[in-house]
Amino acid sequence: MKTLRDIPSVGSLLTAAESSLLCERFGRRAATGALRTVLNGVRADVRIGRIAVPSDKEIVRNAFALLEREDQSTLRPVFNLTGIVLHTNLGRAVLSQEAIEASTAAMRSATALEFDLHTGKRGERDDHVRKLLCELTGAEDGTVVNNNAAAVLLCLNTLALHREAVVSRGELIEIGGAFRMPDIMLRAGAILVEVGTTNRTHTTDYRAAINDRTGVVLKVHTSNYRIQGFTAEVAAAELAALLAGSAVPLMHDLGSGTLVDLAHYGLKREPTVREAIADGADIVTFSGDKLLGGPQAGFIVGKKALIAEINRNPMKRALRVDKIRLAAIEATLKLFRDPDRLAERLPTLRWLARSSADVKSQAERLQPGLARILGTNYFVEICECDSQVGSGALPLDVVPSAGLVIRCRPNGSLDQLTAALRGLRSPVVGRVVDKGLLLDLRCLEDESALIFALSTLELDGSS
Ligand SMILES: *Cc1c(COP(=O)(O)O)cnc(C)c1O
């Protein structure tokens, strides 16, 4: 019978043949630490008689498993089966192959980021996207920053520092994650002037609020809610007409800001950036990773003189994007030059445009395999469901979709199931509805990858 004294030392284990792979894979230092952790546990357990002294091989195996667990990235890719195509907590848009390749190339080598290849002189990083932005939106000029929140902050700080910014009470939005328009105003150094009421704002309200302290009139797209019923708002074109001839610029925060007419892809129409510019906004801001389907970014397009002023703001430097994202942005924007192939190449649009019949036949293909993997404690049914765009875009609109709903038999546990799915090497994230786990398959492309991921699922008591 082995006793406490028979437990090997870290040193002897490290030199044992069993450990060579451990050291090779994780390095000697990490291997030493892991062996020490496992041995401490073994010693404690043996002392109270919970276990017998394990073999060297087993100790090394446990150290390996420990390091492997620690080595897994917490930021690892997941299967987004939530039915929310642009899920903010799951990283919003999935990038196109073109964008992935462009940013990979930018990562791998030096790039002409701020270097003009024609003159050999210093260039500007905005130059890589300026022309494209103008072409796609009809604006005179454009620039790009970290995200749309940054775009709004920078524009307000440039146009309305210590001056008044006029906004309708119906448009004082909060976007998830503590982006509240009044707070952003304050931090931008602008003085918020609210006009109208929550449900009704009229041109006269704006007119009465505009004076020589006014720095900007801000129109905000109420991305994530709708005010319905007895309502009135002043369209951007009317505001532009009101401000015509004055020195006060009109800024329009479009939020998601699409570059194409979504009706072409079977979705509800949203005002495009081009329309916002044509309606007379002097500055328009919008996101890169919402309906645009690119990386996180904030675009600012509009009048040349105002964009120049925004670019001179020292805060621009703190909010700029790096070469990796800039490459992805350029590649994403280029796809919009060919609207006919856009849905094919841009995952966000491809998934939003997928027919529910197509998703349903995928559910039919996957149902038997999933049922087999889950065993006898669960049952799996094909169901119809609704997907959402997400990220506050088209909040009231749903896209008819399909998927698989997993329900428990008496010995099944939904909590255990969802936890096990999250714990996979490629985690699977669905959504819980009426005591079942719904896997909306709208965003699933690689079926065999999902089946492979699920095949590693370990559930207590499943057979
Ligand atoms: C989403 C949104 C923002 C913030 O954009 P991010 O790119 O997430 O920073 C700002 N304004 C509106 C109206 C939005 O919908």
Image (cartoon, grey):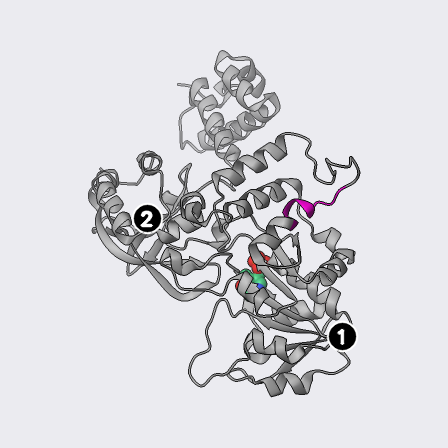
Question: Could you tell me the amino acid type at mark 2?
Answer: Leu
**SS for callout 2:** loop
Q: Which residue is mark 1?
A: 163
Q: Which residue is mark 2?
A: 441
Q: Residue at x 59, y 22 (%)?
A: 27
Residue 283, relative to residue 335: is it above or below?
below
Percent of width and height locating residue 441: 32, 48
* Some atom of ligand 1 lies within 8 Å of the CB belonging to the residue at label 1: no
Q: Earlier in the sequence, mark 2 or mark 1?
A: 1
* Some atom of ligand 1 lies within 8 Å of the CB belonging to the residue at label 2: no
Percent of width and height locating residue 294: 53, 48
Residue 8, relative to residue 103: is it above or below?
above
Indicate left or right for 201 with 434 as reference. right
Indicate left or right for 419 with 189 as reference. left
Camera-side residue of 92 and 65: 92
Q: Quadrant of the C terminus?
A: top left
**SS for callout 1:** loop
Q: Quadrant of residue 206?
A: bottom right
Residue 76 seen:
yes
Percent of width and height locating residue 150: 65, 58
Label 2 to label 1: alpha-carbon separation: 49 Å
Q: Quadrant of the N terminus?
A: top left
Question: Could you tell me the amino acid type at mark 1?
Answer: Arg
Percent of width and height locating residue 358: 27, 48
Residue depth check, mark 2 versus mark 1: number of the one nearer the observer: 1
